[in-house]
Image (cartoon, rainbow, N blue to C red):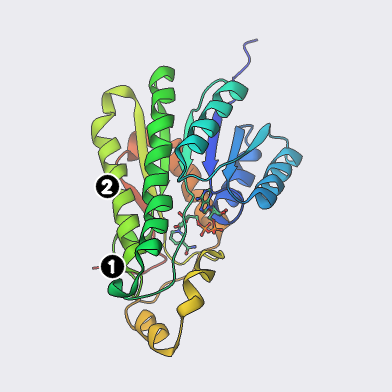
């Protein structure tokens, strides 16, 4: 009887939040998992948890904005598991809530480097492996901020508009190569990502955010992970599009 080869999934930002929740669900489905994050302690914990669920898994410490680190996680994935079938390009940060003119260039550079350059570098080094392999599917974690900015969040919104641009371009440009890209846009997801943004939160900013955000139902990371896995498994159908996990919020 022929053995079915396990497929290889690389997930960035898998130490916590959505990345970890997705890894834990995939672990129950016999995928080989490469857990990538710069948070070593929690990244190793995710890796131990997925191994307990029966998956073969490896942790690679990497800052996704560092080209050498990205080359290294791609190389390690291929050396260990042979190829990359799925790439969940998920790592991201927020910066403190401010009006655009109030941001320091250092804050701009930090978030652009992680959310946009980090996503690009992942694509730059994973796509050649997929070309070699005859195809693959990429899931880019975007945001409701890819459609409509929340107040005092302009630079983050710009980064997430950029990643939807990358997603559409892959959908358009790689059809004949069997490489597909799907966006998944969480809206109000219960993770710790906004802790860093909330350092500037005050009554005025809180009121502006409230007044510019339509009612919506918050989602858990586990719920959004279901959309990540659906996107991953339906790349050909969905390529270039984004699954909008809006929770009832209408953006236009
Ligand atoms: N939580 C929300 O409401 C929400 C909404 C829309 C989009 N998102 C997006 O979802 C994705 C996952 O975020 P989350 O909510 O699970 O938050 P999270 O902070 O729990 O997860 C983000 C992960 O990315 C890692 N990371 C950050 N910078 C990194 C770097 N330079 N190199 C390597 N790893 C890095 C973090 O260590 C963390 O493990 C992000 O792209 C985020 O922008 C979240």
Is 17 drawn above or below residue 127 in the view shown?
below
Q: CA distance from mark 1 to mark 2?
A: 18 Å
Is 19 drawn above or below residue 32 in the view shown?
below
The residue where tag 1 is placed is 251
Residue at 72%, 45% in the rendered image: 49
Q: Could you say which is closer to the camera, residue 26 or residue 195?
A: 195
Q: Nearer the viewer, mark 1 or mark 2?
A: 2
Helix, strand or loop status at disc 2: helix
Q: Could you say which is closer to the camera, residue 231 or residue 104?
A: 104
Direction from residue 45 to residue 246 in the image, left or right? left
The residue where tag 2 is placed is 165
Which percent across, then down, holds residue 62? 56, 42
Residue at 44%, 71% in the rendered image: 96
Direction from residue 224 to residue 210 in the image, left or right? left
- The answer to whether the residue bearing label 1 lies less than 8 angstroms from the nearest atom of ligand 1 is no
- Which image quadrant: the C terminus? bottom left
Is 201 drawn above or below residue 234 in the view shown?
below
Is 187 drawn above or below residue 21 in the view shown?
below
Q: Quadrant of residue 150?
A: bottom left
Question: Crowding at label 1, few (<14), some or many (≥20) Cα neighbours within 10 Å?
Answer: few
């Amino acid at each position: 009887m022929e053995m079915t080869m396990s497929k290889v999934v690389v997930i960035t930002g898998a130490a916590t939040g959505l990345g970890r929740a997705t890894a834990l669900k995939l672990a129950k489905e016999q995928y080989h998992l490469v857990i990538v994050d710069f948070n070593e302690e929690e990244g190793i914990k995710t890796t131990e948890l997925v191994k307990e669920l029966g998956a073969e898994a490896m942790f690679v410490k990497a800052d996704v904005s560092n080209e050498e680190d990205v080359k290294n996680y791609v190389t390690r994935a291929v050396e260990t598991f042979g190829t990359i079938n799925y790439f969940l390009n998920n790592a991201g940060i927020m910066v403190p809530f401010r009006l655009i003119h109030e941001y320091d260039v250092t804050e701009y550079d930090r978030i652009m480097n992680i959310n946009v350059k980090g996503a690009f570098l992942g694509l730059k080094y994973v796509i050649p492996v997929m070309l070699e392999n005859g195809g693959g599917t990429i899931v880019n974690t975007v945001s409701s901020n890819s459609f409509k900015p929340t107040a005092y969040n302009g630079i983050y919104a710009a980064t997430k508009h950029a990643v939807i641009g990358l997603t559409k371009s892959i959908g358009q440009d790689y059809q004949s190569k069997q490489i597909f890209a799907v966006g998944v846009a969480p809206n109000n997801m219960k993770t710790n990502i906004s802790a860093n943004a909330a350092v500037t939160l005050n009554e005025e900013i809180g009121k502006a955010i409230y007044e510019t955000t339509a009612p919506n139902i918050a989602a858990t990371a586990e719920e959004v992970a279901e959309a990540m896995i659906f996107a991953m498994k339906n790349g050909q159908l969905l390529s270039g599009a984004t699954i909008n996990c809006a929770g009832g919020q209408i953006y236009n």
